[in-house]
Amino acid sequence: MNIIKIPARPQKGSNSAKVEVKKLRVAAYCRVSTDNEEQATSYEAQIAHYTEFINKNPEWELVGVYADDGISATSTKGREQFHAMIEDCKAGKIDMIFTKSISRFARNTVDCLNYIRMLKDMNIPVFFEKESINTMDSKGEVLLTIMASLAQQESESLSQNVKIGVQYRFQQGKVMVNTRCFLGYDKDENGHLIINPEQAEVVKRIFREYLEGKSCKKIAQGLERDGILTSRGKTKWYDTSIRLILENEKYMGDALLQKTYTIDYLQKKRVKNTGIVPQYYIEGDHEPIIPKELFLMVQEEIARRAALQDWFGRKTGFSANHAFSQIVFCANCGEQFRRIHWNNRGKKSIVWRCITRLKEKDKCRARTVNEETLKAAFLNALNEMIGDSDVYLNRLKENLELALNAANPMTAEALSARMSELQQELINRTKQRENYDDVTEEILHLRELQEQKGMDDATQLEHTKRIQELQTFISSQPSEITEFDETLVKKLLEKITVHDDFLEFRFKSGVTISIEM
C-alpha cells in the first residue's frame, strides 16, 4: 500500500490571524434545604465556588449562578431560580450547567430524569461534580437513574423519620401551631400558646356576632369595613375563614392534633384526616379565648343552620339578609314565614308569608304580614316593656332566679369522676392484655353524655345572659324607641308567632308580649 501525503496549502497571513472561538456559556445551580446557620454558609460558599470556577476558564462565559435557598428538593415546584434557569435554557442562553450533586438538583427520580432528558434534547449537558457524571456521556443516564433512585430513597427515609418525630410529639401532647396564621395567639419562649389581646378581641367579636344571628359572610364584610386585619395581616376576609375560626377547638383551650396528614411525601400533598391515622385530643392545653360553654353553643348553632330547608325540603343553609329571617312562624301550621316581594294590583311591597300557604294555598290560610307592620309591632313590644319597666324587671328577676336554681353541677362532676375510673381501668387491662371493649364502649358513651351536659350548661348560661341583657336594656332606656334597629332584633328576639289578629313576640329572656294588628 502506497500512501502519499498531500501537504496543506499555505495561507496568506496565517501566522498573524487568530480564529475567534465562541465561548461556552456556562451556568451553575445550587440549593440548600434548611435555614440554619451552617447551611446558610454552605449556600454562600456554593455561589462563590461556582463563580470562581467558571470565571477562571478562559473558554467559558458565566451566565449566572442560579440559587434556591431553604427549598425542599423532593419536588421542583416552588423553586423559582431552578425554573428561571430552565427557561433561560429554552431561550438559548445556556450551553452547559454545573451542579454539586444529584441530591442538590433533585431527589425525585421522575423530575430529575425528565429535566435531564429535556436538556439533552436541547444539547445542554449537566455535570454533577460529586458523582462525576456528565449527562451527555453514553453511560450518563444509566448512572444518573441509579443515583437519582438512591437519592429518592434517602428523601423517603428522611420523610419517614420526620413523620415519626411528629407522631411522637403528638403522643406526648405537644401542640404545634404556626401562630403567624392563627388569629388570637402568639408563642412564648417555650413554644406555648399565649393570648394576643388585640387579636383575641376580634375572635370574641366573631363568636358574638355569629350567635347574634349574623352569617359568616356578613361578619367578614363587617371586619373589612372596620379595617381589621387577618392573622396574615391582609385586609380581605373570607366567609370560609370565619367558619374555620368558629369551628377551631383551640379557642376554648383544647387542641385536636393530626387533623390532616401527608399522603405523598414527594408532592407534600395533605388531606383531611377522616380516621385513617390516629388523632389526639388535648383538653386544657392553653388559656382559652372563648368559654367552653359559648364555643359549644356556636357548634350547636352551626349544626342548626346547616340543617335548614326550603319549602321543597331541600337544604338551603342559613340566610341573615334580614333580621326577621328564620324567626317568624305560623300559629296555624307551625311553618316558617318567608320574605317575598309582593306586587298587589300594581302596588309593590315586601311581605312575609307562611311557606305552607305558598306551597299549597288550601292547606293554610295564615294571613300575610307587611314588613313595615312587623317592624312597628316589634317597636311597640319594646316600648311596652320600657313603659311598664317595673313590671317587666320584676318578671325578669323571677326568670333569672329560676334559671340559676336549675343548674346541676354535680352531674358533670359525677361524669368526670367515672371517666377517670374508666381510663385507669383501660390502662390496667391494656397492661394485662385483657379484653377492654366494654370499657371503650362506656368511655365513648360517657363522652357523648359529657358533650350533651356541656350543651345543657351552655344553654343555661346563655339563657341567664339573655335575661341580664334585657334587664340592662330596659333599665337604660330613658324614653320610648322610635327608630327600628335590626341589631336589637338579633340580640333580644327569639321568635315571632303570627296569629290571625295579633303577633306574639318571644324574647330570648323568656318574656312574651302580644301586639294586636
Image (cartoon, helix red, strand yellow):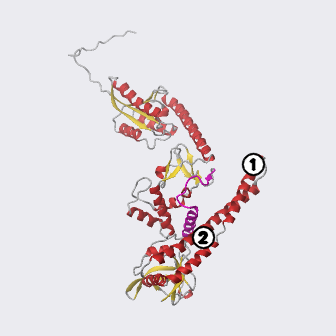
124 sits left or right of 73 in the view: left
In the image, residue 12 sits, relative to residue 356, either above or below, namely above
Extreme residue in the top direction: 2
| Residue 227, picture quadrant | bottom left
| Residue 66 in the image, given as x and y percentages of width and height | 38, 35
Is residue 292 shown in magenta? Answer: yes
Q: What residue type is disc 2 on?
A: Gln
| Residue 294 in the image, given as x and y percentages of width and height | 56, 64
Residue span colored magenta: 278-306
Tell which tag, 1 or 2, sits nearer the viewer: 2
Circle 2 packing at 10 Å, graded few (<14), some (14-19), many (20+), is: some
Q: What residue type is disc 1 on?
A: Thr
Please say whether residue 443 is visible from this viewpoint: no
426 sits left or right of 456 in the view: right
| Residue 372 in the image, given as x and y percentages of width and height | 42, 83
Which residue bears the numbered disc 1?
430
Extreme residue in the left direction: 13
Tag of residue 223: none
| Residue 206 in the image, given as x and y percentages of width and height | 48, 63
* Cα–Cα span, label 1 and label 2: 39 Å
Of residues 259 and 493, the one drawn nearer to the viewer in this rendering: 493
| Residue 272, picture quadrant | bottom right
Circle 1 packing at 10 Å, graded few (<14), some (14-19), many (20+), is: few
Which residue bears the numbered disc 2?
460
Of residues 30 and 59, the one drawn nearer to the viewer in this rendering: 30
Q: What element carries label 2?
A: helix
| Residue 161, picture quadrant | top right
Of residues 300 and 104, the one drawn nearer to the viewer in this rendering: 300
Question: Split into 4 quadrants, where in the image is the N terminus?
Answer: top left
Is residue 249 shown in magenta? Answer: no
